[in-house]
Amino acid sequence: MGTGRPLALPTRPNERWSLDFVSDAVADGRRFRVLAVVDDFTRECLCLVTDTSLSGTRLVRELDSLVARRRKPKTIVSDNGTEMTSMAILRWCQQTRVEWHYIAPGKPMQNGFVESFNGSFRDACLNETLFSSLVQARPAITAWKEDYIPSEFAMKWQWKNRPHKARLETKDSPENWGDIGSQVSSEIFTSTVSDTLAQIAIAGASVRLKKIKVLKGIEPATPYQRG
């Protein structure tokens, strides 16, 4: 357990999760909440749990489900909400030996990874859909989670570290994007320089031809050339 102290950036998947709640309402005004859990290294959304009430006991159940699928993290980061500080969570931390880090009150930026995700989730899903009921909201939110694409960094890391048998390396593979980008930039630069030099050579040849014609009296000289 800890509060407010700085945290080092995670260096591998499943090292640290961050979680938070997002609130919204259905068409008739009834409120519901969504539990969002994010892997701070890969930026993946690990789960979005939608319900009218999410107690500390329910939070423990959802965490147990995640741990069964992914193994437990070293650290979890959250605010000081009542669900996060409940006896159910305290017992869970003791039993699993997962370190729970509480951010300082009124400092949501200390939980920046999940806060950033929440912004994307609200803009791209909640603000775009008026749910008629919780029954409609749950599958729609789950479908959005499945389609959610984390950062390019996370995509490249996941591709690079996928099982060896699943690899099919091509020049379009995400792990080669950097090389391809450098190659394309080099090709563009080379092409641009070549085109520029060609244009200079053509312009120079045109000037020399003009000068020869003037010297031979084929064309009159311009005022600039007379000077």
Image (tube, rainbow, N blue to C red):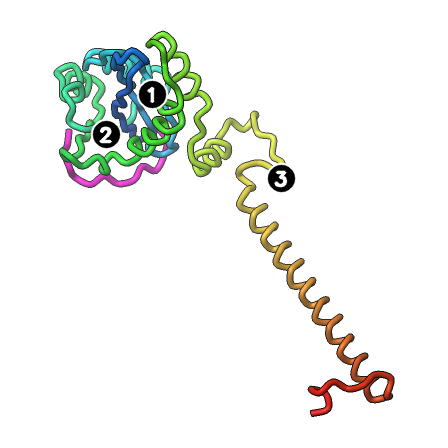
Q: Residue at x 36, y 25 (%)?
A: 127
Question: Which residue lies at the image location 18% right of the left edge and 21% below the top edge?
Answer: 84
Q: Amino acid at mark 3?
A: Lys
Please state which of residues 29 and 187 is positioned toward the viewer in this rendering. Answer: 29
Decide whether the magenta segment is chiefly helix, strand or loop.
loop
Ranked by sequence position, the earlier of labels 1 and 3 is 1
Disc 2 is placed on an element classified as strand
Q: Is residue 27 magenta?
A: no
Does residue 82 sit above or below 202 in this rendering? Answer: above
Q: Is residue 6 magenta?
A: yes
The residues bearing labels 2 and 3 have C-alpha atoms spaced at a distance of 38 Å
- Locate residue 16, reporting x and y percent: 29, 30
Which of 173 and 184 lies nearest the eye of the viewer? 184
Task: Give how far across and how far down residue 20 sits, in percent.
Answer: 25, 25
Front residue of this view, candidates 122 and 103? 122
Mark 3 highlights which residue?
A: 171
Compared across the picture, whether 92 is left or right of 222 comes to left
Q: Is residue 190 left or right of residue 82?
A: right
Tag 2: amino acid? Val
In the image, is residue 135 above or below residue 80? above
Q: Which residues are magenta?
A: 1-14
Which residue is at a point 78% across and 80% down the rendered structure image?
208
Q: Quadrant of residue 63?
A: top left
Which circle marks residue 71 in the picture? 1
* Residue 32 relative to residue 148: left or right: left
Mark before the other along the chain sequence, 2 or 3: 2
Q: Which disc number belongs to residue 38?
A: none
Please state the horizontal and vertical placement of residue 6, each as a whole percent of the image: 20, 41
Secondary element under disc 1, as helix, strand or loop, is: loop
* Quarter of the figure with residue 8: top left
Q: Looking at the image, is mark 1 or mark 2 nearer the viewer?
A: 2
